[in-house]
Amino acid sequence: MPLPDTLYCAQQIKIPPQLPDILKSFTKAAIRTQPNDLLQWSAAYFHALAKGECLPVKERLERNVGTGLTPGLLKILHKQMSSRPMCSREELQMKWKDLGLPMEQLKTLLSLGCFSSEFSWIEFFALGCTALGETLESSLKYACEILTNDEEGGPARIPFETFVQIYTFLARLEGDLSPQQIDNFLKSLEPQVAIQDGMIKPVNFINMNDMDSTPSSSTFLSSTTLEAE
């Protein structure tokens, strides 16, 4: 029912019965997410709520975080952007801004990946993980922990096919590993993957220092600062 053009008394204002629950959920989401720009995030929250889209809300509170990308925020972006294999720079910039993340950090990531106006989401996600981990190994661990359907503290399993995409992109971008080393490393994981129903977990690849192709063999993109100041 449309509102009258002129309001003469408080009785004319109709408050939806769902409003208290909506505001309660919003308050809990804001406390859990701790957005850097509350106003920008609130607008994005209610826009997504009205459209039935994925809300920009962390699953749990992250403590002692700065203003840059965090595992919780990267997980939000993945939920928002991963419905299609390709994403646009314009849409990502909007979602990034909604989360109150520094645009300079986004520019750095886009530049490192040499991304055009449209690019693979999983490749940008992989590069986002390098803003969280100092080495290729730790970046891969973050990827597993963010993408897994396991409970927090569990094995953090993800499909090996997804792991191959992320690892191959980052290893090639780093440039220190030859195609043969990359291939040898992936083949070395296949026996474990085969008995884990096509899944891989961090314990399968962490601290494999006896292999020339181990992903912990070098600091990933050490010359470039990805974390926000």
Image (cartoon, rainbow, N blue to C red):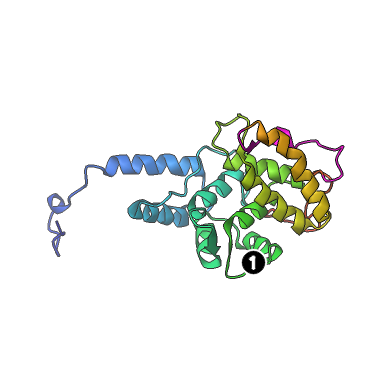
Total residue callouts:
1
| Quarter occupied by residue 2 | bottom left
Main secondary-structure element of the magenta-colored stretch: loop
Residue 199 on the magenta span? yes
Observer-nearest of 60 and 34: 60
Q: Residue 103: percent from the left, percent from the top?
A: 60, 62
Q: Is residue 144 above or below residue 91?
A: above
Residue furthest out toward the bottom: 117
Q: Is residue 55 left or right of residue 182?
A: left
Q: Residue 197: percent from the left, percent from the top?
A: 60, 34
Q: Which residue is mark 1?
A: 115
Observer-nearest of 27 and 9: 27
**Residue visible at 27% across and 44% down in the picture:** 19
| Quarter occupied by residue 72 | top right
Amino acid at circle 1: Phe
Q: Is residue 87 above or below residue 66?
A: below
* Residue 186 appears in view: yes
Q: Residue 134: percent from the left, percent from the top?
A: 76, 47
Q: Quadrant of the C terminus?
A: bottom right
* Residue 64 appears in view: no
Q: Is residue 6 above or below residue 24?
A: below
Label 1 sits on a secondary structure element that is loop
Q: From which residue to which does the magenta span run?
A: 197-213
